[in-house]
Amino acid sequence: MPGTLLFTNATIVTLGETPEVIHDGALWIERGKIRAFGPAAEVLAQAPPLSKLDLQGRVLMPGQINAHNHLYSAFARGISLKEEAPANFLQILQRLWWRLDQALSSEDVYLSGLLGFSEGVQRGVTTVIDHHASPACIDGSLDRLAEASLQVGLRACLCYETSDRHGPAGARQGVEENARFARQCESDREGRLAAALGLHASMTVDPATLQYALRQWPADVPVHVHVAEDLCDVEHSLKTYSRPPLQRLLEDGLQDRPVWAAHCIHLQPQEKELLARHGVTVLHNPRSNMNNAVGCAPVQELLELGVPVALGTDGMSQDPSEDARVLAVLHKHQAADPRAFEWKNIYRVAFLEPARLASQRFGRQLGQIVVGAEADLMVVDYDPPTPLSGQNFLGHWLFGMGTAPVWGTWVAGECVFWQGQVSGIDASDLRSRCRVAAQKLWERW
Ligand SMILES: [Zn+2]
């Protein structure tokens, strides 16, 4: 039966509100869902004869969830800029990202997706929330990413980055690509694809485009937008709309919709209240923020106000565990106080909120080992050198388990990666196709 399997001899880490560690555990997957788990003797007593996988003590835990990503950045790896090094965030956009995304072909979009999703499952990622831009080939671009995600087999929530950077026609196409893909996803019964509705940021979305988007877009699908990533977004909004960007976006129509706001670094005091009042989810990307030198989001304060904050990689890599390690040190460093960002908050941002967000969007339980949840799992080759328990899991994750080799990844009980092989993908052939495509892109961008 597809999606049916029994893991034995596993060190199970459940995650969830109160993580538990079960040594010498077993986990039974039936039709893609977790049917039972616990001490091996108990599970084996109730499971019928099934194909078994002996994990030899390795860690079995929920797959990683990346709450904000840009797969299209794949071919920026090793690129040389054609202009002087950017001195600020706007110049980073102008000299790198807006030049690169404009040069992407439909095939580049597909290959970037295939590469990123493959690299993700090799690090145990089972769900990716992406924000895509390819202004020269907007129509159907989300289908190319969806094709890549289905080929690799993980779950992907996709949107297109609507903006007025390329005039009203480009903006309209962006709006329509989001609307088209969102309608298409409504018929996805498998739960592998989901849609959000993408806006770039307040500073590149004109009032007419925002109103057009609100007319075209279904009201129940979340709007995924960058907010106050840099002061330039705030200054533009204050100058143009006499209000800061989050306030402008909410007041001009987003207040009645679910909103995912990436970054939220330079918030005005009233905007922090607005986030809480409107139930906006903030997507936090600490490595990217440091790399762009744009500042540090007030995550501790937002959590205290009850604002959900979920961790993403923002295209820096496909492995959220790298951002978890930065998350754990950045806020202490910023506050010059080792007590500034508590463990429970690191755990909330790195695990609980991404799981909540993905579960909500895909309409099924993700990111936790409980009976009835989706069997989205990874096996980590980690033999703890100090005692491991539910109470100290995060310490192991941040200081060893998170960098340990991933042996296998399952999505809905189907193996998508096992011992170095991504199912259905010739990784070396893919990398060679990507090198050719990247070389051409670097010549024309
Ligand atoms: Zn982003």
Image: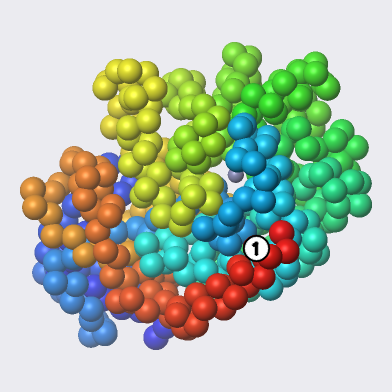
Res 258 visible: no
Q: Can you tell which quarter of the image residue 433 is in?
A: bottom right
> Measured along the vertical axis of the image, is residue 55 above or below residue 158?
below
**Left or right of 67: which side holds 20?**
left
Residue in the image at 76% along x and 18% along y: 238
> Measured along the vertical axis of the image, is residue 165 above or below residue 127?
above
**Left or right of 366: which side holds 114?**
right
> Measured along the vertical axis of the image, is residue 258 above or below residue 76?
above
Report helix, strand or loop for mark 1: helix
On-image quarter of the N terminus:
bottom left
Q: Position of residue 35 (x, y in %)?
A: 33, 68
Residue in the image at 46% along x and 57% along y: 318
On-image quarter of the C terminus:
bottom right
Q: Position of residue 192 (x, y in %)?
A: 56, 67
Residue in the image at 67% along x and 70% along y: 440
Q: Which residue is mark 1?
A: 442
Characterize the local packing of mark 1: few (<14), some (14-19) or many (20 or more) Cα atoms within 10 angstroms.
some
Comparing 102 with 417, the one in front is 102
Q: Position of residue 426 (x, y in %)?
A: 46, 83
Q: Position of residue 313 (x, y in %)?
A: 48, 48
Q: Residue furthest left?
A: 386
Q: Quadrant of ligand 1?
A: top right
Q: How many marks?
A: 1
